[in-house]
Image (cartoon, rainbow, N blue to C red):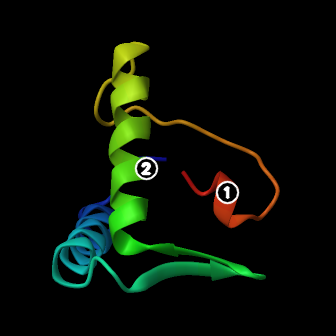
Amino acid sequence: MGETDRDTRAKLRLTQGIARACQQTPGRMAIIAGGEAMSWAVFADRVARLAGLLCREGLRPGERVAILLDNSVEWVC
């Protein structure tokens, strides 16, 4: 099943919203689970490091990656 323009626009809005939150409110909590929390700044840093690792391993933009882990702030990125 191919990606539609609607799917692409929805992903872009989500990506832009996350980027905006990271820039405008880096100290606010992005993720809260149980007794743990992660700020937008920490989340953005972890996402960037993970993206860099995946690129170094040969993944290219647009390729899909699946990860199956227990729910935890620790495993978000």
Location of residue 6 in the rendering, given as x and y in whole percent from the top left corner: 29, 70
Q: Determine whether 35 is above or below 57 in the image.
A: below
Of residue 65 and residue 2, the one placed in the foreground of this image is 65
Of residue 68 and residue 30, the one placed in the foreground of this image is 30
Image mark for residue 46: 2
Q: Residue at x 42, y 62 (%)?
A: 43
Location of residue 50 in the rendering, given as x and y in whole percent from the top left corner: 44, 38
Of residue 66 and residue 50, the one placed in the foreground of this image is 50
**Location of residue 70 (image quadrant):** bottom right
Label 1 sits on residue: 74
Three-letter code, disc 2: Arg
Location of residue 37 in the rendering, given as x and y in whole percent from the top left corner: 60, 77
Image mark for residue 18: none
Q: Is residue 6 left or right of residue 49?
A: left
Classify mark 2: helix, strand or loop.
helix
Three-letter code, disc 1: Glu
Classify mark 1: helix, strand or loop.
helix
Location of residue 40 in the rendering, given as x and y in whole percent from the top left corner: 37, 72
Q: Residue at x 32, y 44 (%)?
A: 48
Label 1–label 2 contact, CB within 8 A: no
Q: Residue at x 40, y 49 (%)?
A: 47
Q: Is residue 56 left or right of residue 20?
A: right
Q: Earlier in the sequence, mark 1 or mark 2?
A: 2
Mark 2: give few (<14), some (14-19) or many (20+) Cα within 10 Å: some
**Location of residue 17 (image quadrant):** bottom left
Q: CA distance from mark 1 to mark 2?
A: 10 Å
